[in-house]
Image: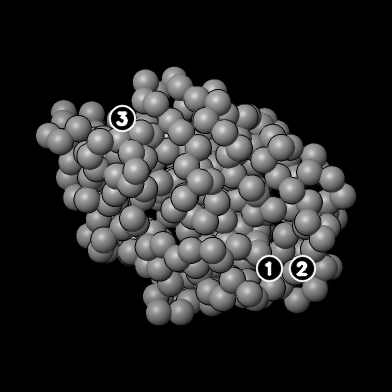
Amino acid sequence: MKKILITVLLLSVFVVVSCGGSDTGDSGNTGDTGDTGDTGDTGDTGDTGDTGDTGDTGDTGDTGDTGDTVDTGDTGDTGNTGDTGDTGDTGDTGNTGNTGDTGDTGDPESKHCVRSCSVPNDCVFEPSNAITDADNWECKTGICHYKGCNNDAECESVYGVTGKTYRCNKDGAYGYPECTPVCSTPQDCSLYPPEWEHNTAYDSDNYECKSGLCYYKGCNNDAECTATHQAEGYGCREFDFGEKKLKICVALCSTPSDCVVAGSNYTADHYKCENSQCVLKECADDLWCSNLFGNDYVCR
């Protein structure tokens, strides 16, 4: 009975705790990542997914909102979301839901499919909310960039239903301002009450209470990721978000075929399996991206 209650709580919390969005990058399957997703208020598969941060579904992106080039965020854990690998996926306030394609954890300077734009409104995915609408994006050099939350009111609008007080934390774990709960101790940041903590990637030892706001430190080891997803085949690996690096839970691989998600636009040819970790290959050109995701995607 306790295991069932934990699972229900994980699924319930995941839906409301992920926050923030992502630079519209090209992946999003596992990047934790973590944290489910920090930016999405509707994580796709609860705490069983990866980071992030995140797919081509707007406010679902970390582990949280997810990379905008994926069918689904990592939350997981989290998919790479383009220039800075933003995935909310793995949102720092909750489990990162599985967001489809495995996110790129390689060089953030390599080329990936990103969404093109003329104005910020071109970057918005529907349905949007207070932290994923047009004023949370900027169109810079013709490419969509997620700016994060703008103020506390936006965070309260999205996460007020949780019963916790959320603030727009300018020192976000993923390199952009994100909504995080207020805290006195790290226990205030945990997804679980003390008696229910069970060595997952979102217990009190994965958070820091900095200046009265929760800050996600990342997963600590592979065992936490196995417990979080209640399955073998997940590991704790460093993900480069451009501005910051963070350890999140990701799906592991033996061959590129292990990285493919049913229904995804990506095939085994789009992946490399490096150090047991799925990594997206660089895009070849704009046509390569438009064939995968549509005419508004380019290779940058």
Could you give the CA–CA distance between mark 1 and mark 2, rounded to whole angstroms? Answer: 5 Å
Tag 1 and tag 2, C-beta contact below 8 Å: yes
Whether residue 197 is visible to the viewer of this picture, yes or no, is yes
Reading the image, the residue beneath label 1 is: 112
Tag 2 and tag 3, C-beta contact below 8 Å: no
Instruction: In the rendered view, tell whether residue 104 sits above or below residue 274.
Output: above
Reading the image, the residue beneath label 2 is: 299
Instruction: In the rendered view, tell whether residue 55 sits above or below residue 25.
Output: above
Tell me which residue sits at (26%, 61%) in the image.
220
Tell me which residue sits at (33%, 47%) in the image.
210
Q: Is 263 positioned to the left or the right of 115 in the image?
A: left
Q: Nearer the viewer, residue 251 or 119?
A: 119
Disc 2 crowd, CA 10 A, few/some/many (<14, 14-19, 20+): many
Q: Amino acid at mark 3?
A: Val
Tell me which residue sits at (56%, 76%) in the image.
107
In the rendered image, the quadrant that contains the C terminus is: bottom right
Tag 3 and tag 1, C-beta contact below 8 Å: no
In x, y percent, where is residue 131?
Answer: 60, 35
Q: Nearer the viewer, residue 264 or 14?
A: 14
Reading the image, the residue beneath label 3 is: 8
* Element type at mark 1: loop
Q: Earlier in the sequence, mark 1 or mark 2?
A: 1
In x, y percent, where is residue 59?
Answer: 60, 38
* Element type at mark 3: helix
In the rendered image, the quadrant that contains the N terminus is: top left
Could you give the CA–CA distance between mark 2 and mark 3, rounded to whole angstroms? Answer: 40 Å
Disc 3 crowd, CA 10 A, few/some/many (<14, 14-19, 20+): some
Q: Earlier in the sequence, mark 3 or mark 1?
A: 3
Mark 2 against mark 3, which lies toward the viewer? 2
Q: Which mark is residue 138?
A: none
Tell me which residue sits at (40%, 68%) in the image.
238
